[in-house]
Each structure stands twice: as C-alpha cells, then as structure tokens.
C-alpha cells in the first residue's frame, strides 16, 4: 500500500522537523520514519473499518425507527437493502480487517457516534443512495459500486473526518489524501469469490520499498554537507542561503536518490521532487529545483561521478 510517493513525502516532513530541531541521531529519525509509515497503514485499515461502522450505525438507527413504528402501530416497512449490502458484509467479515480490530482495540469509530450519524445522514440524502435504493434489483457489483461512489464523493470530502483523525494521530492529516486512493483501489479489488479471505493491500508492496525508505533517509542525512556543496556550486546568481529551506531539503533528497538508486532514471527523480515542490514549497520553487538539479546531474554525469542516465 505504501508507495514511494508517500515515502518521499514522509521523509521530507521528517527531515524538515529534524533540521529545525537541531538535528539529532539518524537512527532515531529512521525509527520515527518507520513508525510514521506504520501509522499510515493503520489509517488505511481504519478508513476501511469506517464503512463497516457507518453500516452498524445505520442498523442501529433503522432498528430504533422500526421499534418506534411498532409502538406507534405504524405499518411502514423500512428497506434493509443498505444493511444487506453484499460488499459491506464481505468487508465486515474480512479476516485481515478483523485481525486489525483485534490487535488494535484502541483504534476504531465506536466513540465517534455523532460523526457516524452525520456521515450516514449525508449518505441517505445523496443521489447515489436514492438511485441505489430505488433500483428494481441489485447484485454484488451494484453493492460494491455504491460504496465506491459513497467513499469517493462523501467520505473523502467530509471535513469532519479530517478533524477527527487529526485528533487521533499527528501523522494522519497529511496521509489521508493518499490513503484515500488506496481505499478506493481496495474497494474495486474486492471479489465475492474470495469471501472473508479477500486480501487487503499489504503495508509495503515488497521489501525493496521498505529498504528504499531506510536508505533514502539515511543517505540524505549522512551526505548532507556534500549535497549542499553540489547545490551551492549550481546556484549561479543566487546565494545558497537565499534558497528556501524546504527547497534545499528537496534537492538533498533528490541527490541522495540519484546516487543511491541506479535503477531510477535521473529524469524520474527530478520530476518526483518538482511535483513535491509544487505542493510543499513556494510557487516558484519547482522551477529553481528543476534547473539546479538538471545542472548538477549533467555535470556529475559528465565528470563520471554519477553513472546513470
């Protein structure tokens, strides 16, 4: 689940705090990084669980309404189609998700009843719910598609969730946008034939991604002075100390990546950090970073100090 884009973002945020706080031990920084990545995976599971808990709240609300109708001798029949949704039933019984629940008893939405009620109300007022509930017949695909639409158009956009998870974990607010895309990918991957054994996305795609995170952080810290000297030589009319602090960190990371991962083309690395600069630094930073990194990489390749294209 955790891809290299998220890894780069996590390292950038960590390095910013690391240098602002007077540096420290690289081993401690690496420990914090891995903890942060673990927390991102917790958020992934927690957001999957949110769909289950919204349905449980719906069940409670519908049962309460049915009881009040019974006492008042009202014969209105309330549809259970939303509760009987086959995708959500499969998700509720998923072995990996239930293992997460069992091993993380402090995480969940049980204490957030008002949030669950608001989300359920938003769902029942939506066009997606209305269309689903009025279809003559629905199958598994329709059940799964309903939750894909609800997640993408309601849950992903709910400010209340952002506020809630920010209180739960300091890492999660910056993670949610990316983790949301993994949840949507998971919904689309669900197959009724897999039942409770449906595989969720793994924390890391493979060991190489975990190793990528550890090496990139370590090399950026260990070779900080060398990378800064390379940047300084390419600044031209700009003095090094006039560069935005975030830009320097981004370029140090890019250089660490160029030197440490021979399989990643220089152009790919530069593009990754240009995109990060657009989001995390000043409006003009991506242009400076592009020019400086391009200049450094060409010079290093010409001097045979960087053996890649």
Image: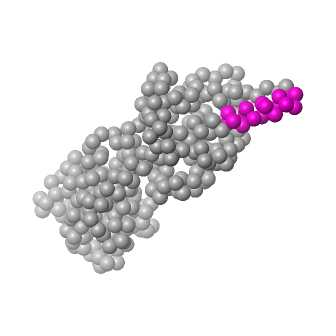
- Is 66 within the magenta? yes
Q: How many marks?
A: 0
**Left or right placement of residue 67 versus residue 273 in this view:** right
> Between 47 and 268, which is closer to the camera in this rendering?
47
> Between 290 and 258, which is closer to the camera in this rendering?
258
Q: In this orientation, does residue 278 appear?
A: yes
Q: Which residue is found at the position 15% from the left and 54% from the top?
A: 307
Say if 276 sits above or below 111 in the image: below
Q: Which residue is found at the position 87% from the left and 31% from the top?
A: 72
Q: Quadrant of the N terminus?
A: top left
Residue 51 image offset from top left, x and y in percent: 57, 38
> Between 309 and 168, which is closer to the camera in this rendering?
168
The span picked out in magenta is 58-74
Q: Which residue is found at the position 54% from the left and 44% from the top?
A: 108
**Left or right placement of residue 279 versus residue 85 in this view:** left
Q: Which residue is found at the position 48% from the left and 30% from the top?
A: 94
Toward which corner of the image does residue 26 lie, by quadrant?
bottom left
- Check the image and tell me how it is coloured: one colour
Q: In this orientation, does residue 245 appear?
A: no
- Is 77 within the magenta? no
Residue 39 image offset from top left, x and y in percent: 42, 50
Residue 215 image offset from top left, x and y in percent: 24, 54
Task: Looking at this view, name the residue that lies furthest to the left.
Answer: 304
Say if 87 sits above or below 106 in the image: above
**Left or right placement of residue 137 versus residue 39 in this view:** right
The prevailing secondary structure element of the residues shown in magenta is helix
Residue 283 image offset from top left, x and y in percent: 45, 67
């Amino acid at each position: 689940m955790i891809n290299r884009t998220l890894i780069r973002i996590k390292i950038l945020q960590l390095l910013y705090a690391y240098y602002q706080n007077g540096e420290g031990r690289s081993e401690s920084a690496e420990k914090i990084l891995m903890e942060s990545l673990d927390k991102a995976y917790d958020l992934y599971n927690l957001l999957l669980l949110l769909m289950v808990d919204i349905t449980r709240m719906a069940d409670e609300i519908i049962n309460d309404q049915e009881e009040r109708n019974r006492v008042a001798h009202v014969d209105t029949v309330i549809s259970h189609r939303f509760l009987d949704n086959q995708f959500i039933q499969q998700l509720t019984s998923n072995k990996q998700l239930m293992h997460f629940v069992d091993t993380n008893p402090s995480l969940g939405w049980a204490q957030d009843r008002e949030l669950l009620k608001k989300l359920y109300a938003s769902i029942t007022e939506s066009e997606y719910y209305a269309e689903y509930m009025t279809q003559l017949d629905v199958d598994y695909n329709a059940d799964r598609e309903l939750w894909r639409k609800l997640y993408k158009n309601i849950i992903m956009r709910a400010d209340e969730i952002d506020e809630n998870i920010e209180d739960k974990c300091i890492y999660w607010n910056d993670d949610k946008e990316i983790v949301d895309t993994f949840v949507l990918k998971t919904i689309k991957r669900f197959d009724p034939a897999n039942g409770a054994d449906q595989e969720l996305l793994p924390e890391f795609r493979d060991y190489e991604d975990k190793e990528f995170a550890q090496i990139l952080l370590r090399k950026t810290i260990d070779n900080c002075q060398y990378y800064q000297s390379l940047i300084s030589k390419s600044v031209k009319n700009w003095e090094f100390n006039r560069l935005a602090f975030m830009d320097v960190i981004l370029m140090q990371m890019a250089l660490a990546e160029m030197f440490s991962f021979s399989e990643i083309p220089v152009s790919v690395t530069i593009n990754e950090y240009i995109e990060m600069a657009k989001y995390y630094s000043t409006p003009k930073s991506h242009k400076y970073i592009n020019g400086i990194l391009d200049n450094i990489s060409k010079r290093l390749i010409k001097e045979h100090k960087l053996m890649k294209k």
